Amino acid sequence: MTSQTLTAGKNAITFKSFGVDLAGDLYLPEGFDETKTYKAIVGASPFPQVKDQIPATYGPEMAARGFIYLGFDYLGMGASPALPGEFKQSRYNFRLIENTWDAVSYLGTLPFVEEIYGLGVCQGGATIASAAVTDHRIKKIAMVSGMMAADAFQWTDRDMANSQIAAANASKQKMYETGEPDYVAPFGLNDEHSRQEFIDLGANPMAGESYDYYGRDGVRGPKAVPTYTNMHIGDQGMQSLFSIAEAYADKIVQPSLTIYSTSAFTAVCSTKFVEKLTNDHEELAFGEFSHVDFYYKPEAVKASTDAVAEFFNR
């Protein structure tokens, strides 16, 4: 049981994972009463986000719909520390899953939590789906613009994937030998690019919409969110190219909802995943929104959070 005084709205909290305190925000609904019980959601954010991005958008939205929502910074991200001897911006896939399990455990200590659900956006969709395979404390899962079937997305061009792996291997070796972090821009976008400079790189078909969110002048870029940076540990490719959610899709037993944009080139990461599911599953596709629209555009966020709330309330 928590000894912290919690009130409606955003509450700064911490919980243990890997022996350190991860920083989180617990969003509670209006009129919150600790003597009552509520349905709670553990949130999972896109790569390489912090809790002041997607969780800060979806948290208030889900709280407004009567849910408790926990958004948090993964180990080594944002306001959460790295492990001793390790470096910040080290968002490793397997640790994301374990951090999520510990977030579920934290919610389980709260006497006013009735049931726990999982809600992941982009890479967070893969994290939630992966965590749910063996964590049946999570009763339902929802994935928005999810990257669950990453194989069809990341391995289509084997030469490109192997080039990414080679760079990640070299970075891992460099950091081991020097003891210093090696920061890179995984998507080519750094914290200084202008919008046109990033588009002109020609490396990202979603460059414009990605910049509008993550760029130097973006709505949730490094200027708007001081704990966020586009620079990341250089061995990330050794982690990101694993796709646990896709490999274990047929093992998921919880009811699930997949929401995605049919116009986004990431749609395959949802559709190929859905094809492998054997659980009670629902699919909701929108043609009018893009992948990144679901991050922050009011109409897209309302569409996704309304659908998720209806699904979780059944």
Image (cartoon, rainbow, N blue to C red):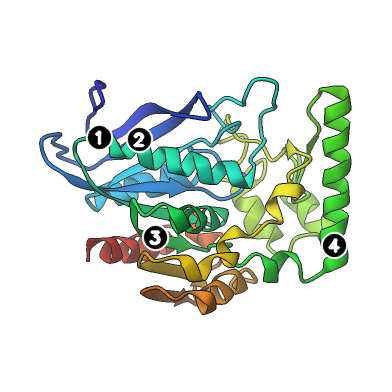
Query: Dot 2, how many residues are within 10 Å of its Cα: few (below 14), some (14-19), or many (20+)?
Result: some
Q: Circle 4 is placed at which residue position?
A: 160
Which secondary structure lies at badge 2? Answer: helix
Please determine whether, in this image, residue 108 is positioned above or below residue 46. above
Q: Position of residue 30 (x, y in %)?
A: 19, 41
Ranked by sequence position, the earlier of labels 4 and 1 is: 1
Disc 2/disc 1 C-alpha distance (Å):
7 Å
In the image, 155 versus 57, the foreground residue is 155
Ranked by sequence position, the earlier of labels 4 and 3 is: 3
Q: Amino acid at mark 2?
A: Tyr
Q: Which residue sits at x=53%, y=53%? A: 127
Disc 4/disc 3 C-alpha distance (Å):
32 Å
Which callout, 4 or 3, points to the residue nearer the camera?
Answer: 3
Q: Circle 2 is placed at which residue position?
A: 106
Which secondary structure lies at badge 4? Answer: helix
Asked if the residues shown at circle 2 and circle 1 are in contact, with their CB atoms under 8 angstroms apart, the answer is yes
Residue 231 in sight here: yes
In the image, 157 versus 54, the foreground residue is 157
Disc 4/disc 1 C-alpha distance (Å):
46 Å
Q: Position of residue 31 (x, y in %)?
A: 14, 39
Which callout, 4 or 1, points to the residue nearer the camera?
Answer: 1
Disc 3/disc 1 C-alpha distance (Å):
20 Å
Q: Circle 1 is placed at which residue position?
A: 110
